Amino acid sequence: MKAINQKAAAILNHLTQDLNTLGDHRRWENSPSFMAVCVEYINDTDLGPVFSVAHYYEQNGDLMRDPEMTFLRRIDGSYYPLSYQQDGLGLYQESVIFGEDGNPEKFIPAMQRDQALFAGQWMQNIKEQQGL
């Protein structure tokens, strides 16, 4: 699997700081000009915790992801994208799928690599937009 770059990992470390227990979450909203960033500890795996990072907007009473990505944080501190979702486009991509035993059972290398590249730019945008 391809990890996100070190600059993006540093931003994710900041966003996930103090999220240590399944269900912990935080909302970053430091600028009225940009969408808030919502971060949640959503899963435990044998390889490490999984976090969701998302922008949301409301459409017809429904929360829409714009986008949401999930990331595995390995014990060595590196982050690996697992999925990407953009509701307004009807897009859902799962590049790493975990089995019931908590281990990856399916992996789509090209998709996961593209998600890692996108995450690098997205984390930089979040940093700038939220003044992190």
Image: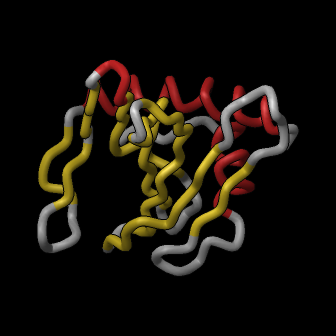
Residue at 22% over, 70% down: 102
Residue at 49% over, 35% down: 58
Name the residue furthest right.
131
Along the line of sight, which residue is nearer the eye, 52 or 1?
Answer: 52
Along the line of sight, which residue is nearer the eye, 82 or 26?
Answer: 26
Residue 93 located left or right of residue 44: left
Name the residue furthest top.
89
Residue 91 vertical position relative to residue 31 in the rendered view, above or below: above
Residue 72 vertical position relative to residue 49 in the rendered view, above or below: above
Name the residue furthest front.
60
Q: Coloring scheme of the render?
A: secondary structure
Name the residue furthest bottom.
21
Residue 127 located left or right of residue 72: right
Residue at 25% over, 46% down: 96
Whole-percent x and y of residue 70? Answer: 42, 48
Residue 100 located left or right of residue 25: left
Residue 113 located left or right of residue 57: left
Quarter location, residue 105: bottom left
Whole-percent x and y of residue 88? Answer: 37, 23
Quadrant into which the N terminus falls: top left
Residue 52 vertical position relative to residue 18 in the rendered view, above or below: above
Q: How many marks on residues? A: 0
Whole-percent x and y of residue 89? Answer: 32, 19
Residue at 14% over, 73% down: 101
Quadrant into which the C terminus falls: top right
Whole-percent x and y of residue 8? Answer: 65, 38
Quarter location, residue 7: top right
